[in-house]
Amino acid sequence: MEKLSQSQEDYLEEIYIQVLKNGFAKVTDIAGALEVKKASVTSALNQLCARGLINYSPYAAVTMTDNGKKLAKQILKKHKILKELFSEILKLDNADKIACEVEHLISDKNLDKINVFISEYKK
C-alpha cells in the first residue's frame, strides 16, 4: 500500500481515538478535533475508505477496518513515544504539537531507538 500523507495519518489517528472512545467517529467531531472544515473531513474519509482503512458513507458513523486499526495503532504509538520524549524528558513547550509533526517523519527503526532511550532514562 502506498504511504499515507501526513494529513491522512492525522485523520486516521483521530478517527481511531474517537472509535476507541465511542465505538465510531462522526464527521462533525473529527472536524472539531482537527480544526478543519467538514468538507475537508469528507474528502479525507473518502480517500481513507477507498484505501480500505475505514468504513464510511455519507451521514453514517465512521468505523475502522482491521487494516485501518492496525495502521492507526502504529501512528498513535509513534505519537505517544515522541510526546513522552518531548514533554517528560526534554520538557519542551508544545510537546504534543511537535510529536504530531515528527511522527510522520521518523522511521520505525529510529523510533525503536528512542523507545529504548526512554526506557533506559526512566531507570
Image (cartoon, rainbow, N blue to C red):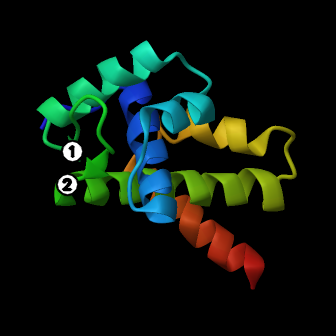
Residue 1 badge:
none
Residue drawn where x is 26% and y is 52% of the image: 64
Where is residue 73 drawn, in percent x and y?
39, 59
Tally the numbered discs.
2
Disc 2 marks a residue whose amino acid type is Thr
Residue identified by numbered label 2: 65
Q: Left or right: 17 with respect to 109?
A: right
Q: Which residue is depicted at the point 56% across and 19% down?
A: 36
- Dot placed on the residue nearer the N-terminal end, 1 or 2: 1
- Distance, label 1 to label 2, CA atoms, is 5 Å
Residue 81 sits in quarter: bottom right
**Nearer the observer, 64 or 80:** 64
Residue at the image point whose x is 21% and y is 44% from the top: 53
Return the x and y of residue 14 as percentages of the image width and height.
48, 44
The residue tagged with tag 1: helix, strand or loop? loop
Q: Along the horizontal axis of the image, is 62 left or right of 105?
A: left
Q: Which residue is mark 1?
A: 53
54 left or right, relative to 122: left
Q: Residue at x 36, y 30 (%)?
A: 8
Residue 88 lies, in percent from the top left, at 81, 61
Mark 1 touching mark 2, by CB under 8 A?
yes
